[in-house]
Image: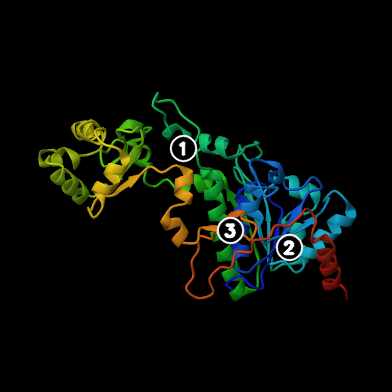
């Protein structure tokens, strides 16, 4: 597999780092989860299936666990011994913490100049907010993303996906892989500073138009990506469910409005987002409200229109598409796991459906660290 032979030390907790290292372990990496004496917090957070939280199950399968108290001189020494043979070290403490603990990039690179050291933090190692405590919601708020996510009352609502966590995680994954590629040519490691706020804002090129072009905040209701465009909107059906139209190309408007007998609305539908779209939206609201979601799913079959029903999460995870793509995995006990999203033709990922107890591999890993540092 692509990552076979690479050793990753993961000091991170919660979501950004563990998602990243979950992908690496699915493709052959040896990921050592370094847990504090109290363990990874998500061992105790949220819903439980098979005596394990679903959060932990879907971020830590296939990893090895060692418990280290990094304030202890003995465990600190074990950590640095592990770093001598590590390819990647990942941490997500607030800036300054790793240096106080003596496990920062300088300490690691001193024993292993070829290591790739990646820090994932809310705001990065520099800037006036760098030491501010924050999780996903606070980061999204400061990045301007929450202001775009409005409810029916036009007030901001909680985002339902951890955007900052995931963008930070995937940006860090790309950065680590690029650094490893470069190391193949130079033999040198590198230090990576990932800000989840930076990553979130870097993923917004489709919505920064008003800010960059007109020096103003977006009027959300008039923006293409947030419902200002009739063919990029959500509509209620007769049974109280919802469907989406999600294609801004003119051909989709032409196809649908022609089939619905309203070609006179095509000019309005292909006009800029905002008030000029309202006649089309009014028509679509009315016609979709006449029939059930099931009716519209059948009606749209075979039509060249970007349509999709709004599925609930249970429906989505049991859909034929998800099953066909092996995104829902089940072990012998019936416990469920999220599959790996990267599909290689050669050397595909091999998710391991095993979960580490706290410090389950501690004795073995300590012995490995000692053996590899003997003269």
Question: How many marks do you count on the picture?
Answer: 3
Query: Camera-side residue: 189 or 22?
Result: 22
Question: Could you tell which of marks 2 and 3 lies nearer the N-terminus?
Answer: 2
Q: Tell me which label, 1 or 2, sits earlier in the chain.
A: 2
Crowd rating for badge 1 (residues with CA inside 10 Å; few <14, some 14–19, many 20+)? some
Label 3 or label 1, whichever comes before in sequence order: 1
Q: Is residue 62 above or below residue 160?
A: below
How far apart in space, not on screen, are marks 2 and 3 (Cα)? 40 Å
Gap between marks 1 and 2 measured at Cα: 36 Å
Q: Is residue 168 above or below residue 86?
A: above
* Disc number lying in front (1 or 2): 1
Q: Position of residue 122 (x, y in %)?
A: 60, 43
Q: Residue at x 41, y 57 (%)?
A: 321
* Residue at disc 2, secondary structure: helix
Check disc 3: other Cα within 10 Å, few if <14, some if 14-19, many if 20+. Answer: few
The residue pinned by badge 2 equals: 109
Residue nearer the viewer, 200 or 110: 200
Q: Which mark is residue 135?
A: none
Residue at far left of view: 264
Name the one closer to the observer, 167 or 31. 31
Position of residue 268 in the picture relative to residue 127 (left or right): left
Q: Locate residue 102 relative to residue 5 in the image: left or right.
A: right
Which residue is located at x 27 percent, y 48 percent?
A: 298
Q: Is residue 114 left or right of residue 270?
A: right
Residue at horizontal 61 percent and vertical 37 percent from the top: 129
The tag on residue 145 is 1
Q: Position of residue 132 (x, y in %)?
A: 64, 36
Tag 3 residue:
330
Say whether residue 246 is visible: no
Observer able to see residue 179:
yes
Question: Looking at the image, which residue is at 39% across and 25% down?
Answer: 154
């Amino acid at each position: 597999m692509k990552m076979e032979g690479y050793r990753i030390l993961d000091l991170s907790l919660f979501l950004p780092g563990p998602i990243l290292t979950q992908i690496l372990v699915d493709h052959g990496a040896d990921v050592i989860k370094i847990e504090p004496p109290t363990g990874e917090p998500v061992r105790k957070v949220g819903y439980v299936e098979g005596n394990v939280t679903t959060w932990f199950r879907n971020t830590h399968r296939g990893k090895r666990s060692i418990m280290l108290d990094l304030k202890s001189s003995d465990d600190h020494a074990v950590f640095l011994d592990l770093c001598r043979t590590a390819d990647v070290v990942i941490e997500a403490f607030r800036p300054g913490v790793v240096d106080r603990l003596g496990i920062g990039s300088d300490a690691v690179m001193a024993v292993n100049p070829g290591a790739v050291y990646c820090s994932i933090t809310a705001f990065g190692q520099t800037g006036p907010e760098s030491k501010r405590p924050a999780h996903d919601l606070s980061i999204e708020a400061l990045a301007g993303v929450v202001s775009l996510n409005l409810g029916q009352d036009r007030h901001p609502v909680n985002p339902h996906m951890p955007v900052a966590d995931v963008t930070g995680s995937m940006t860090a994954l790309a950065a680590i892989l690029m650094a490893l590629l470069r190391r193949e040519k130079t033999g040198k490691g590198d230090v990576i500073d990932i800000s989840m706020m930076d990553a979130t804002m870097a993923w917004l090129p489709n919505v920064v138009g008003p800010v960059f072009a007109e020096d103003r905040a977006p009027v959300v209701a008039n923006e293409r990506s947030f419902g200002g465009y009739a063919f990029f909107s959500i509509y209620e059906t007769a049974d109280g469910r919802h469907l989406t139209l999600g294609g801004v190309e003119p051909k989709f408007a032409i196809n649908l409005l022609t089939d619905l007998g309203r070609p006179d609305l095509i000019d309005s539908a292909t006009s800029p987002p905002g008030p000029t779209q309202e006649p089309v939206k009014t028509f679509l609201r009315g016609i979709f409200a006449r029939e059930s979601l099931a009716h519209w799913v059948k009606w749209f079959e075979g039509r060249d229109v970007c349509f999709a029903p709004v599925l609930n999460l249970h429906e989505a995870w049991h859909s034929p598409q998800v099953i066909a793509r092996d995104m829902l995995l089940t072990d012998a006990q019936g416990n469920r796991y999220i599959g790996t999203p990267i599909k290689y033709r050669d050397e595909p990922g091999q998710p391991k459906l095993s979960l580490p107890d706290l410090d389950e591999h501690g004795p073995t890993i300590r012995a490995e660290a000692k053996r590899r540092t003997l003269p």
